[in-house]
Image (cartoon, grey):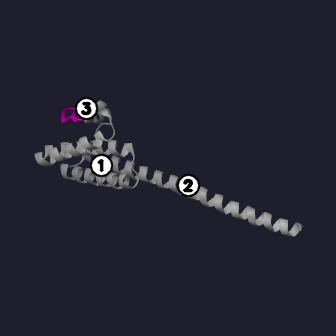
Amino acid sequence: MNKKLFVIGVLLGVSLGVAGGLKLGRLWFEVGQTFGDLSAISTSEEFAFLQYRNASRPAARDALNESARLIEEVNAIRPERSHNVDLGFTYTRLALVEESEGNIAQSKADFLKAQQSFHKTQVLKGDYSERNLRDVISRIDKSADPPIKP
């Protein structure tokens, strides 16, 4: 009788341990994925911002487009309010780059994408006008570290 009780206890303990371990393992995997996504976005945004501040307009455009693509991909898998804010800032900077290159139609299209991204977040007190986006990005960029001198 004691052997049967012992075997049942061991089987029950192993079963509960496996189920609990799988649940915790899945949770940690999801946490790791989330941190990985945030790290990738953060790195991409930082690189794009540095290119925007210090590189040629074509290099800045490429980096900002790549950053926007990455944020959109991650947002499609794991929608987050912060992703739309990041997209709004990225598209605003992209619009300014396009404008500086004389690509007015593309600049307007990028401002529209920025407005749509911000609209999803309800930030900026609801003022998603092109003028306000320019003002906000100007203030943010001025508060960042000074550009790197060659």
Q: Residues within 10 Å of mark 2 (few under 14, many from 20)?
A: few
Q: Nearer the viewer, residue 22 or 85?
A: 22
Residue 83: image location, x then y, percent: 36, 46
Q: Secondary structure at mark 2?
A: helix
**Sooner in the amino-acid sequence: mark 2 or mark 1:** 2
Label 2 is placed on what type of residue?
A: Trp
Q: Secondary structure at mark 3?
A: loop
Residue 54 placement: quadrant:
top left
Which residues, given as a range, are shown in magenta?
128-134
Residue 1 placement: quadrant:
bottom right
Label 1 is placed on what type of residue?
A: Ala
Identify the residue under disc 2: 28
Compared to 137, does 79 lie above or below? below
Q: Nearer the viewer, mark 3 or mark 2?
A: 3
From the image, which quarter does the C terminus lie in? top left
Tell me the residue at 29%/51% (across/down): 68
Q: CA distance from mark 2 to mark 1?
A: 30 Å
Q: CA distance from mark 3 to mark 2?
A: 39 Å
Identify the residue under disc 3: 127
**133 falls in the magenta region:** yes
* Res. 150 visible in picture: no
Tell me the residue at 37%/54% (across/down): 74
Identify the residue under disc 1: 48
Q: Secondary structure at mark 1?
A: helix
Residue 73: image location, x then y, percent: 34, 56
**Is 13 on the left-hand or right-hand side of 112?**
right
Tell me the residue at 24%/35% (across/down): 128
Compared to 1, does 44 lie above or below? above
Q: Residues within 10 Å of mark 3 (few under 14, many from 20)?
A: some
**69 falls in the magenta region:** no
